[in-house]
């Protein structure tokens, strides 16, 4: 079955928009601003965890064509069940409410001076309307919302680049690539890949997309994933470059929290490039980017629990309502508070998610059940010091982690995971050869 250009574009735009939320728009410019002449190195690190890993997650979904449960079932069904529940609870408790908080602080409050409760209530009411109209999500987002977001982003970046004097400052980072990698965690894109990828799979099962055959669906998801990834790459690199080139023209108050620095910088860039109209453009961008991401998260969570409990439509509706109510509650916190709460959670769950994505992309003969189990367990064990070190740092812990390569950068799990993968693969291949 041939893939129609319209289906490819709608799916690509829908996928891009489900990824692109508040963090994706706010984080890159400040990174570039602080990186100065090292902005390209920051961009390289950021793209690893904010583009490459997430798109590999979509490619894994294209192969599995199931749910998030399929990502971890080779470790064990029990592990996969627990992992899925944790991921979806995290998704509706942190990144989803964070989109409402960002929309309120940047787009709504400066213009209307309303309470976060009112903003969150209206915001998640609209999210719920879209989610309950499940079969229309991909078309509505892919045909209308995302093209508008992409066009506005490209206009802002292009005008800002041409308006800049192309002067960069001195980098504030000792290890720009590592900083970029870790900042990529805050986009939640790897977690987003395994959550919204399932949304795409389910959406393609509806009649309006007319996609049924496994190979046709796999081809469509793979191509749309690569197109969405290219779009993310261009937008991220552009935003980081703009932040770097405006570092000599815009002063950001270092005493402010990171989220306010990000918002103020992006607002200043928008106004410098588009005049007073720039503030309106930024508000619309933030609102739409946040809104589409929240839709993807809530729909993905509702889809999972619906499938878990006998494909019950009632479960889908109840889950969506509960996720939106939780979003209203947590959305009362400010953007920075939600990020602080998220850090230890990300340090634990993100490495496991990255490993599961990579293993599911590999050919099956290289990623046996034993490889899955050992690599995931090793990754989990070596991620614990990062979490403990963030929550309660101590000299005793530092003395232990000093022997673990990259542990100082919260990447102590990387080398043990790689070594365990090759070690188990070598042992298994050696046994097969002897037979």
Image (cartoon, rainbow, N blue to C red):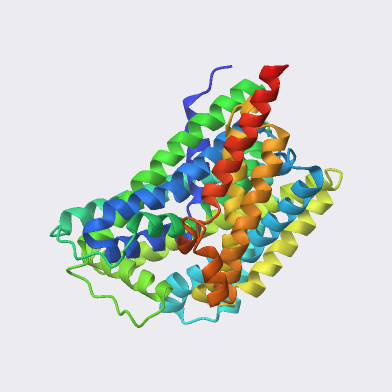
Q: Residue at x 53, y 30 (%)?
A: 222
Q: With 314 as the anchor, is 213 left or right in this view?
A: left
The answer to whether any part of residue 15 appears in the image is: yes
The picture places residue 326, in percent across and down from the top left corner, at: 69, 68
- Residue at 26% x, 69% y is 276
The x and y percentages for residue 105 are 46, 74
Residue 86 located left or right of residue 273: right
> How many numbered badges does the structure rendering display?
0
Q: Which of 42 and 159 is in front in this view?
A: 42
Quarter of the figure with residue 243: bottom left
Q: Give the residue at x 71% y 58%.
A: 86
Report x, y in % for residue 256. 37, 81
Residue 43, percent across and down? Answer: 34, 52
Q: Which residue is drawn at 51% across and 73% down?
A: 335
Location of residue 276 with respect to 74 vertically, above or below = below
- Report the residue that reaches farthest toward the right: 310
Q: Is residue 130 depicted above or below 275 in this figure?
A: above
Instruction: Pick the quarter of the image with the C terminus.
Output: top right
Query: Which of the 4 image quadrants contains residue 295?
Result: bottom right
Considering the image in quadrants, where does the N terminus appear? top right
Q: Is residue 123 visible?
A: no
């Amino acid at each position: 079955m041939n893939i129609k250009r319209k289906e490819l574009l709608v799916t690509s735009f829908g996928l891009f928009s489900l990824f692109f939320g508040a963090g994706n728009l706010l984080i890159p410019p400040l990174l570039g601003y602080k990186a100065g002449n090292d902005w390209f190195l920051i961009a390289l690190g950021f793209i690893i965890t904010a583009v490459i890993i997430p798109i590999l997650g979509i490619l894994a979904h294209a192969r599995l064509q199931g749910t998030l449960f399929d990502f971890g079932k080779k470790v064990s069904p029990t592990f996969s069940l627990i992992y899925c529940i944790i991921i979806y609870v995290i998704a509706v408790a942190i990144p989803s409410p964070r989109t409402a908080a960002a929309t309120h602080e940047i787009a709504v409050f400066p213009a209307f001076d309303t309470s976060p409760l009112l903003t969150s209530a209206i915001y998640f009411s609209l999210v719920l309307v879209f989610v309950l109209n499940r079969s229309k999500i991909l078309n509505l987002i892919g045909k209308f919302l995302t093209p508008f977001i992409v066009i506005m982003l490209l206009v802002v970046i292009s005008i800002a680049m041409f308006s800049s004097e192309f002067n960069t400052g001195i980098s504030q980072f000792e290890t720009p690539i590592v900083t970029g990698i870790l900042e990529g965690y805050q986009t939640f894109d790897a977690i987003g890949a395994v959550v919204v990828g399932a949304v795409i799979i389910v959406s393609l099962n509806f009649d309006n997309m007319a996609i049924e055959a496994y190979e046709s669906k796999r081809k469509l998801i793979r191509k749309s994933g690569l197109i969405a990834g290219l779009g993310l790459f261009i937008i991220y690199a552009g935003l980081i470059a703009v932040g770097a080139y405006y570092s000599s023209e815009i002063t950001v108050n270092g005493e402010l929290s990171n989220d306010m620095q990000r918002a103020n910088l992006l607002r200043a860039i928008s106004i410098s490039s588009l005049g007073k109209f720039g503030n309106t453009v930024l508000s619309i961008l933030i609102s739409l980017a946040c809104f589409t991401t929240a839709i993807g998260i809530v729909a993905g969570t509702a889809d999972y629990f619906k499938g878990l409990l006998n494909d019950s439509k009632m479960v889908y509706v109840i889950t969506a309502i509960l996720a939106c109510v939780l979003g209203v509650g947590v959305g009362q916190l400010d953007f920075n508070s939600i990020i602080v709460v998220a850090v230890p959670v990300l340090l634990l769950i993100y490495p496991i998610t990255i490993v599961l994505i990579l293993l599911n992309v590999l050919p099956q003969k290289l990623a046996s059940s034993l490889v899955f189990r050992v690599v995931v367990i090793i990754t989990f064990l070596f991620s614990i010091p990062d979490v403990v070190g963030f929550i309660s740092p101590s000299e005793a812990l530092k003395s232990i982690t000093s022997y673990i390569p990259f542990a100082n950068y919260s990447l102590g799990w990387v080398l043990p995971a790689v070594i365990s993968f090759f070690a188990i693969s070598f042992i298994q291949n050696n046994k097969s050869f002897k037979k």
